[in-house]
Image (cartoon, helix red, strand yellow):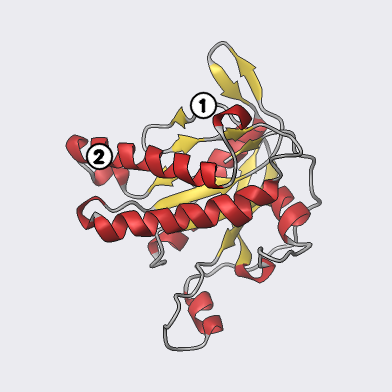
Amino acid sequence: MDVEASTARRNPDKITLRAALYEIVEAALHTGGITRRRRDPLINCGDGILTLVRPGDRTPKTVLLDRVIPELGRLLAEHNAHRPAHRLRLRAAVHAGEVHYDRHGCFGEAVDLTFRLLDSPELKQALSRSATPLTLVVSDPVYQSIIRPGGDRIDQNRFRPLVHVTIAGQCHHGWVQAPQPAAGRNGPPDRERRSAWPTRSPVDSGNAGRAEKMPS
């Protein structure tokens, strides 16, 4: 996950924002039962955080999507309401795949793809057009294996294949989630959802892949 427009902040503000970011992310992960025993320590990315969740039956990918991400959005909104001078708006990316390690840290195509999705112009545009403080993109394997089949708490109709990145000559698609319409707002929900989307044509997507570790 990455903080919007962090380079425009001065260092004293960044100190406050980074402390709040770590506190909020830790709380959201805890809500989903992703304790420190089930993940690597949070990795500092300067103006963001990389979280590596360890694979296991007790930490399914659905936990990230239907518990952690919604809680992250709620905590961000709560923070911004109480501290408007230090508002936080985040882009978040969720992917699953093999992660490798050496003495310098983690690496691999799964990590590369996660960051490429996170830094895509399409996702930045989606967040800039949204009134909500969190915009999510998931990789095509995560969409195809978790979101597309549907579920009680994940609405596949809120995702669009807006992000397209190329790594090692291979094209990858990312599915961006529309913000949930605010309760009590006037106008039909469909119109509100469409207004949040950047203009991009849908594309055909590939098959799901096997996940062994989930960088987000």
Above or below, 171 relative to 103: below
The image shows residue 181 at horizontal and vertical percentages of 48, 75
Q: Is residue 89 visible?
A: yes
Secondary structure of the residue carrying tag 1 is loop
The image shows residue 196 at horizontal and vertical percentages of 48, 71
Q: Is residue 1 visible?
A: no
- State the CA–CA distance, disc 1 to disc 2: 20 Å
Q: Is residue 29 toward the left or the right of residue 201 in the image?
A: left
The image shows residue 54 at horizontal and vertical percentages of 66, 31
The image shows residue 194 at horizontal and vertical percentages of 53, 77
Q: Is residue 102 toward the left or the right of residue 184 in the image?
A: right
The residue that mark 1 highlights is 41
State the residue at coordinates (52%, 70%): 199
Give the residue at the far top of this rendering: 103
The numbered dot on residue 16 is 2
Above or below, 24 relative to 177: above
The part of the image, by quadrant, that contains residue 112 is top right
The part of the image, by quadrant, that contains residue 211 is top right
**Which is more toward the observer, 61 or 123?**
61
State the residue at coordinates (56%, 82%): 190
State the residue at coordinates (37%, 59%): 77
Above or below, 100 relative to 167: above
Amino acid bearing label 2: Thr
Q: Quadrant of the C terminus?
A: top right
